[in-house]
Amino acid sequence: MIRIHNHKLTISKLKMNYAYHTTNLKNTSIFRRGKYCLPRTRPQIRFSTQCLEFSTIPKEKTSSLRSIAREKEEEEVEKKMEESNKEMLMIQKWLNQHNELYTSATRHPFTLSIRDGSVDLSAFKRWLGQDYIFVRAFVPFVASLLLKAWKESDDDSDIEVILGGIAALNDEVSWFKREASKWSVSLSSTVPQKTNLEYCRFLESLMSPEVDYTVAVTAFWAIEAVYQESYAHCLSDGSKTPEELKETCRRWGNDGFGQYCHTLQNIANRRLEKSPEAIISKAEATVMRVLEYEVEFWNMSRGET
Ligand SMILES: Cc1ncc(CNC=O)c(N)n1
């Protein structure tokens, strides 16, 4: 009969214990039967929380002991994963579940081409003109979020974070104008493309007072996080981003912007934690839509739509 009480023992520990006790067994009766005489059956281990005992158990049962230990180990790992999933914050959970979509937005061929230096400059200029239009629509969205925070938030500091975001957008609009003139992109004659219009319309739908603060602030985090991840990657080790594009990458890829996105993520997680299931589902679906729009926006910049 094999019983394992101490199921925390891993396979490798089990092997070590086995080896250790086998060495000690050299002086026991089964080993002392003759110079070259090995026991007919292998010494076997019985676990208890207190001590390890030995008995002679047929060889075939060794493997069954191992498989029991392995099963126990797997159960343990599964339980730990379930527990950590419970502790995991909502956004982390979503990113694990929808990792493929998140990666397609944050490691898109367009930004990867900036990173490896193969970017088509006409695509970059197209992105610049279109993104200026997007950012102009993004400002009223963030303003509507400020209003929601003022009405609904349980934490005063949310307003300051969002206000900081609006201040950064003020700088950003000026930067777009300077950058566009540097690249000879005429902003006044840039026509919004279909994908851009649809994304702007989606932003407008989120401005409605019907949309909950939690849903809107989670969407805000997702929109900012995609640019932060995408452009930080263009500056990370091994990147060959051309010098003339580095300023664009630093705008969203700098550490300060990273910290700001982290703060937004904390706000969203805090709100989601206190939200009923219906709001959580809406927020999750909204994040998915944002990620899809971001992918389409990069596609559009490459000239695919
Ligand atoms: C399409 C898109 N998504 C996210 C951002 C980043 N937020 C503000 O600048 C952006 N500029 N454009």
Image (cartoon, helix red, strand yellow):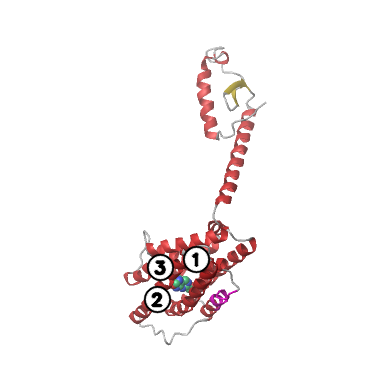
Q: Which residue is mark 3?
A: 252
Residue 181 picture location, percent across and down: 34, 82
Q: Secondary structure at mark 2?
A: helix
Q: Which residue is mark 2?
A: 170
Ligand 1 within 8 Å of disc 2? The answer is: no
Q: Residue 277, located in which quarter of the rendered image? A: bottom right
Q: CA distance from mark 3 to mark 1?
A: 13 Å
Amino acid type at mark 3: Trp
Return the residue nearer the eye: 273 or 282: 273
Relative vertical location of residue 144 with respect to residue 154 in this rendering, above or below = below
Queried whether the magenta region covers residue 176, the answer comes back as no
For label 3, the crowd category at 10 Å Cα-Cα, with few meaning under 14, some 14 to 19 and many 20 or more, is: many
Q: Main secondary structure of the magenta part?
A: helix
Relative vertical location of residue 276 with respect to residue 181 in this rendering, above or below = above
Q: Which residue is mark 1?
A: 221
Residue 8 picture location, percent across and down: 56, 35
Amino acid type at mark 2: Asn
**Furthest-left residue in this view:** 243
What is the magenta range?
A: 201-209
Amino acid type at mark 1: Trp
